[in-house]
Image (cartoon, rainbow, N blue to C red):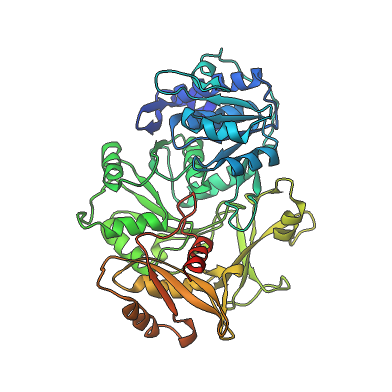
């Protein structure tokens, strides 16, 4: 099924139901359907055709949601771009995907103008305060006044739906190609194990440019549920108040959000009684954080999950397993197969570390215009007609088929002739009662090869380097104990709010 068909179907059946709640506008299903139809007609009138790529360069706002569905209704491919993206990176993406149009806001027009200088890209922008339309752009508001008429693009569900550009921390960003069929399969599987229903009200603060945030929208509309869209988690108390006001039932988290919640002193268990479930991905939650979150949300299920942009999601831990294996990211999600292999691609027995491989209808089609990179991660599968995803992540599985993340293949630190997975050290650091967040990386060392270094955020400023090192020495093998501890007010993060090991390494190298 094509993604946009869900919107039209729910608009016809339950038009007055609230689809979207934002700080400055609420949209019913019939209103969202109407507005996206009008914008699709405007895009088509300005040359956007089936298969064209269109960038949605906005923060979390109702216009971004309308834009995504309008692009799909025009038969085109949307690419959500983080609002903090700079002009040089945006210019690369525009050129790489040969974008036909950019949908943006007045605030971001200077970046768009610089990135698209000399090109023929069609630009639509929201009006500036006072109603002025930015130079070089067509008014977003005017586009919404187009006659509502279907765009007859004749698209099918194996067409591309979206290009999600990876963060590019190790080089130029790559465009992950996902078809409508890929997206629908992922959304169906995730909503199945989360036990989502049309009655769910999901609070999302994650950027729509981050696939975890984007899928909150896509899953909501697929179900006919309601999405509360906020721009960030910078003011947690305001988010909590919105959850109470709207009786939100779903609250997707990333570890940095969990750490912020757990540092707050003025909240009590059960303070958000409407929340039915919490979910976490992007990185594993420390076991201690899981326990404390469960205390604060006694009536909610907590789902630890693992995935990557190239397949969206692949494993989840059933909440009833948290007590038995809190450090596991679980089993394959419905309609998915995962297994761990050695360097030769052979399956390894339980307990042995190897690379995780994913099979399923949600695995990407490849990287846009990058056959070499595609060939490295999509390799022949069990059947002659299929390719499976080699994730580049090291895992082990237990005897019952539950999986445990060990680390990225390229994150492994070699020190004193031994191999160290940063996640193992981070797990110990997070268990210290004064540590709120931690990230571990390796620093080049002439004697050790690499020295283990940690950036740490603490809740008690009296805790010093010696205390942290002693604690690690009491819980880790000698070669795994960090040699360098640096205290920070916050950890370096990517545009999507994920703690970045690469950025941590860069800051430590500079400090040295």
Coordinates of residue 155 in the picture (x, y in percent): 69, 30
Seen at 28% across and 59% down, the residue is 263
For residue 231, side relative to residue 311 (left or right) = left
Viewer can see residue 314: yes
Seen at 59% across and 75% down, the residue is 353
Front residue of 120 and 354: 120
For residue 415, side relative to residue 246 (left or right) = right
The image quadrant of residue 94 is top right
Coordinates of residue 108 in the picture (x, y in percent): 50, 33
Front residue of 241 and 118: 118
All told, the count of numbered labels is 0
Residue ranking furthest to the top: 147
Instruction: Tell me if residue 396 comes above or below residue 380 in the rendering.
Output: below
Coordinates of residue 202 in the picture (x, y in percent): 39, 42
Instruction: Tell me if residue 322 comes above or below residue 91 in the rendering.
Output: below
Residue ranking furthest to the right: 384
Coordinates of residue 33 in the picture (x, y in percent): 50, 24
Viewer can see residue 399: no
Seen at 48% across and 27% down, the residue is 106
Seen at 62% across and 52% down, the residue is 310
Image quarter in which the N terminus is found: top right
Front residue of 336 and 362: 362
For residue 368, side relative to residue 395 (left or right) = right
Instruction: Tell me if residue 66 comes above or below residue 280 in the rendering.
Output: above
Instruction: Tell me if residue 376 comes above or below residue 424 in the rendering.
Output: above
For residue 155, side relative to residue 208 (left or right) = right
């Amino acid at each position: 099924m094509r993604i946009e068909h869900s919107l039209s179907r729910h608009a016809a059946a339950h038009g007055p139901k609230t689809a979207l709640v934002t700080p400055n506008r609420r949209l019913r299903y019939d209103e969202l359907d109407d507005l996206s139809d009008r914008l699709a007609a405007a895009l088509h009138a300005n040359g956007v055709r089936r298969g064209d790529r269109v960038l949605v360069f906005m923060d979390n706002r109702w216009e971004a949601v309308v834009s995504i569905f309008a692009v799909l209704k025009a038969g085109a491919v949307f690419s959500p771009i983080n609002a903090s993206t700079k002009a040089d990176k945006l210019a690369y993406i525009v050129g790489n995907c040969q974008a036909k149009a950019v949908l943006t806001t007045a605030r971001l027009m200077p970046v768009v103008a610089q990135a698209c200088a000399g090109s023929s890209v069609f630009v639509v922008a929201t009006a500036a305060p006072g109603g002025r339309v930015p130079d070089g752009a067509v008014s977003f508001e005017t586009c919404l006044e187009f006659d509502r008429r279907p765009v007859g693009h004749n698209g099918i569900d194996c067409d591309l739906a979206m290009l999600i550009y990876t963060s590019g921390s190790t080089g130029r960003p790559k465009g992950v190609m996902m078809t409508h069929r890929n997206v629908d399969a992922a959304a169906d599987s995730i909503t199945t194990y989360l036990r989502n229903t049309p009655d769910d009200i999901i609070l999302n603060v994650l950027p729509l440019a981050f696939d975890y945030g984007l899928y909150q929208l896509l899953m909501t509309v697929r179900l006919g549920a309601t999405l509360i869209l906020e721009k960030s988690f910078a003011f947690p108390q305001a988010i909590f108040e919105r959850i109470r006001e709207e009786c939100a039932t779903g609250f997707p988290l990333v570890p940095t959000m969990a750490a912020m919640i757990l540092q707050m002193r003025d909240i009590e268990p059960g303070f958000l009684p409407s929340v039915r479930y919490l979910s976490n991905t992007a990185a594993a939650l420390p076991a201690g954080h899981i326990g404390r979150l469960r205390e604060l949300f006694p009536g909610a299920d907590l789902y630890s999950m693992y995935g990557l942009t190239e397949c969206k999601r692949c494993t989840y831990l059933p909440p009833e397993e948290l007590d038995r294996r809190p450090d596991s990211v679980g089993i394959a999600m419905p309609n998915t197969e995962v297994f761990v292999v050695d360097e030769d691609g052979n399956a390894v027995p339980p307990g042995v570390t190897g690379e995780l491989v994913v099979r399923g209808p949600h695995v990407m089609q490849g990287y846009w215009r990058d056959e070499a990179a595609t060939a490295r991660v999509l390799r022949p599968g069990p059947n002659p007609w299929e390719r499976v995803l080699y994730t580049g992540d090291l895992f082990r599985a237990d005897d019952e088929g539950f999986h445990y993340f060990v680390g990225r293949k390229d994150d492994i630190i070699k020190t004193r002739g031994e191999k160290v997975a940063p996640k193992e050290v981070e797990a110990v650091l997070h268990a210290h009662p004064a540590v709120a967040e931690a990230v571990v990386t390796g620093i080049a060392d002439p004697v050790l090869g690499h020295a283990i270094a940690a950036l740490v955020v603490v809740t008690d400023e009296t805790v010093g380097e010696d205390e942290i090192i002693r604690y690690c020495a009491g819980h880790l093998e000698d070669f795994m104990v960090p040699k360098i501890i640096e205290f920070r007010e916050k950890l370096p993060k990517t545009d999507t709010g994920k703690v970045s090991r690469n950025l941590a390494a860069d800051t430590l190298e500079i400090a040295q």
